[in-house]
Image (tube, helix red, strand yellow):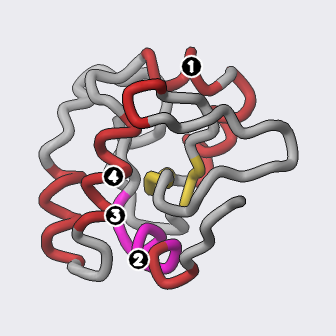
Amino acid sequence: MRRRDEPHLVYVRSLRCSICKNNIETQAAHIRMADARIAKPLSGIGIKPDDRFTLPLCNEGHRKQHAMGERRFWSLYKFDPILIALALYSVSGDHEAGEAIIGGLDVTGSPLCRGA
């Protein structure tokens, strides 16, 4: 059963985009792909994963995440989206800590978002 956490989604939306660092119109992008390391199941079409598996993405990045396929999208970056989502969940509500996590991601040369 899906675990919902609206306060966490509000928190994720308050952070900069994980990729381009844009802080305007950030969305909480759910990560649907499975991860055997933590027994995270694949979420099907129309079924969102737990809200703890979210990252902040700008509108453009979020659209591209869905359009090109999640595995392909995340493979373009030098970080583990599941690990970062869980790190953000562990500091949920602490804006300064969340910004430090997002700010520490090196996405130099990323081809997708406007600011990258």
N-terminal of the two: label 4 or label 1? 1
Mark 4 Cα within 10 Å, few/some/many (few <14, many 20+)? some
Kind of element beneath mark 1: helix
Up the image or down, 114 lies above or below 68; here it is below
Considering every residue shown, the one lying at the far right of the view is: 46
Q: Which residues are magenta?
A: 9-16
Left or right of 45 in this view: 37: left
Labels 1 and 3 touching (C-beta < 8 A)? no
Question: Looking at the rendering, in which quadrant would you find the N terminus?
Answer: bottom right
Between the C-alphas of marks 4 and 3, the distance is 5 Å
Residue with the mark numbered 2: 11
Question: Can you tell which of label 2 and label 3 is closer to the viewer?
Answer: 3
Residue with the mark numbered 1: 71
Which residue is at 80% across, 37% downward? 44
Would residue 12 be counted in the magenta stretch?
A: yes
Which residue is at 25% across, 54% downward? 87
Left or right of 37 in this view: 32: right
